[in-house]
Amino acid sequence: MTTIPKAARARLPRGIWVLGFVSMLMDISSEMIHALLPVYLVTVLGASTLTVGFIEGIAEATAAITKIFSGALSDWLGRRKLLAALGYGLAALTKPLFPLAPSIGWLVVARFIDRVGKGIRGAPRDALVADIAPAGLRGASFGLRQSLDTIGAFVGPLVAIGLMWWTADHFVAVFWVAVVPAFLSFGLITFAVKEPDSSREPAKNPLNAAAMRQLGSMYWRVVAIGVVFTLARFSEAFLILRAQNIGLNAMWVPAVLVLMNIAYALSAYPAGVLADRINRTALLALGLVVLAGADLVLALLPNLPGLAIGVVLWGLHMGLTQGLLSALVADTAPPSLRGTAFGYFNLFTGLAMLAASVIAGALWDAYGPVGTFLAGLGFALAALVGLLAAGKGLAMENKS
């Protein structure tokens, strides 16, 4: 196990903090919209829950597919920041489409373009974090960025709640306010992030078969684990719909994401620090156990206390697993192919999110929320069994 000097533990590089605040501001913007969008689609525009699941799945799959190309391009160029800034800029420019959209079709287009921006920035940004972070502090670095990102994810819904109260449930007004932090995020990455000098050779063709083999078997095992995790975890849109299902007023529905992301933000950085010190398979297994508990509570306790417990457990599972999976990708991928590695990881997990969200929407329409969350429980337990069976071959202790 790696021994990390106290001075190193106490001080992460400035660039990690800045990238965390960039993510935080964009998440404030995005979550102000996403916290209300499922309810807006269902109650104002008359969409079905299957449509919501399809839109959410397509959105995340679009981001994932884009990430593979942007990640590979960052390896080919040997530069990360330009593509990350381009992605944040595109996301900022598309935010006004949400208040301007007159129909479901236009909202699909807005969500699609917004996720293209996320896809362009995602893999280069994660590779940039890996480039900046000291090798022994990757878990802490990804955990910190995830925590700051998630602070934005609960501040956004809090602002949405306040604005919904102030404007008497005026969805479009809230969507307009969400434009502001998106442009602040773009400005911050453009002017305050410096890409580290690197002696690595740019990859000549990051997407060919030879490069895929060069990533190594350990990396592909991490990808497989990420896919299984994602199949067990569908879109958070269904947490919002569960809140509406039990009778929560539209103004208070964003509180679901506030509560989830508080749990997520409070657990992500400590989990990242812990992941630099202990066997990582155990943390992943714990995350699946917590997810299974969340699904069980959300299925069987259709009241406000049950919703609160289930949502907190859902956020805790995210904190235990998401930053850790990113750190594992950074650990197992060659430095010259990190962008491509994050791209492939997000491609396959994004496709799994599409499948999981469409299945969840179909189950909701056919069997209601109980069927959806019990199915999620089954996927989580199956994933746990698979993880424990493969645990001995994963060698997920910290790298020196």
Image (cartoon, rainbow, N blue to C red):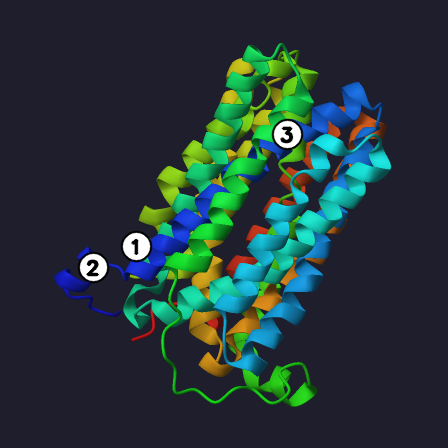
Image coords of residue 137 (percent x, y): 30, 64
Q: Which residue has dot 3 on it?
A: 175
Of the residues under marks 2 and 1, which one precedes in the sequence?
A: 2
What type is the residue that disc 1 sits on?
Answer: Val
What type is the residue that disc 2 sits on?
Answer: Arg
Q: Which residue has dot 1 on it?
A: 273
Q: Residue at x 60, y 46 (%)?
A: 92
Compare residues 230 and 381 and report the one nearer the observer: 230
Q: Which residue has dot 2 on it?
A: 9
- The number of numbered discs placed on residues in the rendered structure image is 3
Q: Nearer the viewer, mark 2 or mark 1?
A: 2
Image coords of residue 390 (percent x, y): 54, 66
Q: Residue at x 64, y 55 (%)?
A: 117
Q: Quadrant of the N terminus?
A: bottom left
The secondary structure type at the circle numbered 2 is helix
Q: Nearer the viewer, mark 3 or mark 2?
A: 3
Depicted 396 relative to depicted 361: above or below: below
- Is residue 82 rendered to the left or right of residue 193? right
Depicted 253 relative to depicted 207: above or below: above
| Res. 359 visible in picture | no
